[in-house]
Image (cartoon, helix red, strand yellow):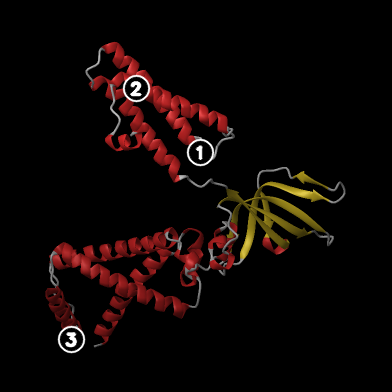
Amino acid sequence: MDAGVTVFTIAYVAILIVPGIIFKRFYFNGAFSKQFNLGLFADRLITSFFCGILVQIASLLTFSRIINVSYDDFKKELIKSYSTIHKDSLPDLSYDQVLYTFYYAVYCVALAALLGLLLYKLVRFFKLDLRIPAFRFANQWHYYFRGEILKTNDFKGSSRGKVISTEVDVMLKDNNGKSNLFSGLLTQYTINANHQLETIYLTGATRFSQTSQRVKPIPGDIFIIPYETIQNLNIRYNFLTTQKKEVGKYIVLIFSTLLLIGGFYYPWVTDLVVWKKILGTFLLFLFWLFLTSLIMSFFNPTNGSQALTRGAKVTILFFVLLTLFLCKLLFGWEIPSFLKLFTK
């Protein structure tokens, strides 16, 4: 009986706790890796046990399909092994059973790592940790230093675009009790096991000189500041300002491209002589050029270009109608029947 209890205790740890630990190890990674060891031992044990159960359920459902073993067959072998161990003897396992057990152990570990990493990617990709506090990681400094805190409900409306870099202003106290202001671009930081800030690393650091009343650069590449020496910390974000995409411009661009292709193709499928086909191609190109310029003039100018005046628009409209009339004469286009109603 004691041997059976011992064996099942080891099996409990190997089957439930280990996959749960691996799942959490891959879920807490990157800037949040230290959260893996955070919390009371009992809490971590319970969460590992719960995650291990989920991993085992997923492993059994998928692995049984791979090796084509039904639930009843698995249940029968499990009851048989338990009955043998309960009688203080080891079950008689065949070579295939040992091999399948090894395969299952490797599969379970790999699936636990994959599920943990996949859940982490999903939470970060859909920003669930920013929208739902229950998914929030313990490393709050990551959200502040990377500007992601601006996307939470507490700071909603403060974001002005995508944060591309973070600058900090720190007030330090020297040995004489005087305060000194340092600034620089935040490139890295370190935290301890309790997610308390330990050190920040600045590049392009400067300091404010009280004697000369101006900012002076600090020689060197990386300026390291222990957090315990910081009195005040100010964070400044550099945003990437992006212009809103105008859907109308893309529609006009697609329409203009199709019109240009049709203008080069149409004259060569008519019954005109070659020189008229060349002339028609040139006229259709001019029509396309003037029409596209007229339509694009109604959009806001970009890249510092000047907007067309009303007189320029009228002139372009005149050339649009002129080239269209010449194309009508050349190709012998008829006025559409629905337009004839307005010409009567």
Mark 3 vs mark 2, CA separation in Å? 100 Å
Res. 119 mark: none
Give the percent coordinates (x, y) of residue 342.
35, 37
On-image quarter of the N terminus: bottom left
Crowd tier of the residue under label 2, counting other residues whose Cα lies within 10 Å: few below 14, some 14–19, many 20 or above: some
The answer to which of marks 2 and 1 sits earlier in the sequence is 1
Write the residue at 32% across / 28% down. 261
Question: Tag 2's secondary structure?
Answer: helix
Looking at the picture, which amino acid does disc 1 mark?
Phe
Looking at the picture, which amino acid does disc 2 mark?
Cys
Q: Which quarter of the figure has residue 4?
A: bottom left
> In the rendered view, would you say 163 is above or below 260?
below
> In the rendered view, would you say 222 is above or below 176?
above
Which one is nearer the viewer's eye here, 200 or 293?
293
The mark tally for this picture is 3
Q: Using residue 194 as the reference point, say whether residue 332 is left or right of it.
A: left
Q: Using residue 169 as the reference point, say whether residue 310 is left or right of it.
A: left
Q: Are marks 2 and 1 in contact (CB under 8 Å)?
A: no
Res. 87 mark: 3
Location of mark 1 (residue)? 298
Question: Tag 3's secondary structure?
Answer: loop
Location of mark 2 (residue)? 327
Mark 3 vs mark 1, CA separation in Å? 89 Å
Give the percent coordinates (x, y) of residue 195.
57, 67
> Which one is in front in this view, the residue at disc 3 or the one at disc 1?
1
Crowd tier of the residue under label 1, counting other residues whose Cα lies within 10 Å: few below 14, some 14–19, many 20 or above: few
Give the percent coordinates (x, y) of residue 145.
59, 58
Give the percent coordinates (x, y) of residue 178.
83, 59
Question: Tag 1's secondary structure?
Answer: loop
Looking at the picture, which amino acid does disc 3 mark?
Lys
